Image (tube, helix red, strand yellow):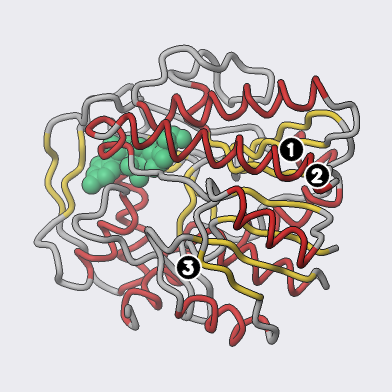
Amino acid sequence: MRVLLTGGAGVIGSHVAVELIGAGHQVEIVDDLSNSVESVIGRIGQVAGVTPTFYKLDVRDEAGLTAVFEEHRPDAVIHLAGLKAVGESVAQPLRYWDVNLNTTITLLRVMAAQGCHRVVFSSSATVYGTPEELPLTETSLTGVGISNPYGRTKYANEQLLVDAAGADPGLGVTLLRYFNPVGAHPSGLLGETPQGVPNNLMPYVAQTAAGKRAKVMVFGDDYDTVDGTGVRDYIHVVDLAKGHVAAIAATNPGVHIFNLGTGQGVSVLQLIAAYSRAVGRDIPYEIVARRAGDIAECYCSPAKAKADLGWQTELTIDQACADSWRYEQGAR
Ligand code: UFG
């Protein structure tokens, strides 16, 4: 298939591009480089053996996006472009709603005009808000108790895409609800280099291991969990990328929803211990107060993706830590 990847220069997009190329697809990338660098495109080529065509473009630029469609006539779109920092979304809600919704609206408009009928969207476990049940399944309650604008834009995007599919019986929409993506490509060439202080746990642990931060701040040890610290479902970014390859093939008309996670909960302290094993020494940490908006536990049942897509995770948290550490040591 010819696959257009929006946000393809980002950490998830670059891994998706590698897996798509490996599976024999032709990949074009659109990215405005607002949170990524163009050199990633060359590194995708180094890893995958084929360098994707790249357009520096904001997906909200309807004329520009139309020109890309006219040139490549994609069979499917994987739509990853968007803003994703929870704290920033609280400070800049209008920007988050504008970018995260208007990218999708423009994309759907151009797809309809150009006769492209398949879209895979990067959604998030955040749509489940405070989980009512664990493990989360695709039919668990969504849209209630989402604690920040970023999360609400993900949920709104899901509704938008469902409405678009409702109005167009030929449109196939797949919503992929990511749990916590971590790790990096085993080549050491692709990964995440957060700008400023990392918001997410594993990049913070990586920078602490590298001596860039004094210690990891563990946000609370009084949750009702295995050791009192927050529990999440950490999925290796390579496994996550493979989930997208499985999803595009199955994106038939209608709406399809899949959790992409391991099904296993890992606590903050367990993750720090795993990273310490990868590095070969203890990583300093300190227990501090809970972070506002955090939930105690979040993990999924990935059974539907296994049954319908034939996909399941293959890599462990230890491999994710080892790959993250390899990337961190060569960090550019
Ligand atoms: N944590 C710390 N110290 C840190 C950072 C995080 O103890 O410096 C803890 C958190 O309290 C939480 C766990 O580590 O228990 C994971 O936190 P992350 O910030 O890495 O991830 P979240 O689960 O909070 O958020 C992630 C994504 C969001 C998404 C959310 C729900 O980053 O985009 O999952 O799906 F909205």
The mark nearer the N terminus, 1 or 3, is 1
- Rendered location of residue 280, percent (x, y): 30, 74
> Amino acid under label 1?
Thr
| Residue contact between numbered discs 3 and 2, judged by CB atoms under 8 Å | no
Q: Is residue 57 visible?
A: yes
Quadrant showing the N terminus: bottom right
- Rendered location of residue 272, percent (x, y): 30, 54
Residue at image x 34%, y 37%? Answer: 95
The residue labelled by disc 2 is 118
Q: Is residue 314 left or right of residue 219?
A: right
Quadrant showing the C terminus: bottom left
Residue at image x 89%, y 39%? Answer: 252
| Residue contact between numbered discs 1 and 2, judged by CB atoms under 8 Å | yes
The residue carrying pointer 1 sits among few (fewer than 14), some (14 to 19) or many (20 or more) residues within 10 Å by Cα, namely many
Quick one: 273 or 330, which is closer to the camera?
330
The residue labelled by disc 3 is 184
- Quadrant for residue 315, please give it: bottom right
Q: Secondary structure at mark 3?
A: loop
Quick one: 42 or 232, which is closer to the camera?
42
Q: Is residue 118 left or right of residue 180?
A: right
Relative to 47, does residue 205 appear above or below in the rendering? Answer: above
Quick one: 114 or 151, which is closer to the camera?
114
Which numbered disc covers residue 60? none
Q: Is mark 2 within 8 Å of ligand 1?
A: no
> Amino acid under label 3?
Ala
The residue labelled by disc 1 is 174
Quick one: 131 or 271, which is closer to the camera?
131
Q: CA–CA distance between discs 3 and 2?
A: 28 Å
The mark nearer the N terminus, 3 or 2, is 2
Q: Is residue 267 visible?
A: no
The residue carrying pointer 2 sits among few (fewer than 14), some (14 to 19) or many (20 or more) residues within 10 Å by Cα, namely many
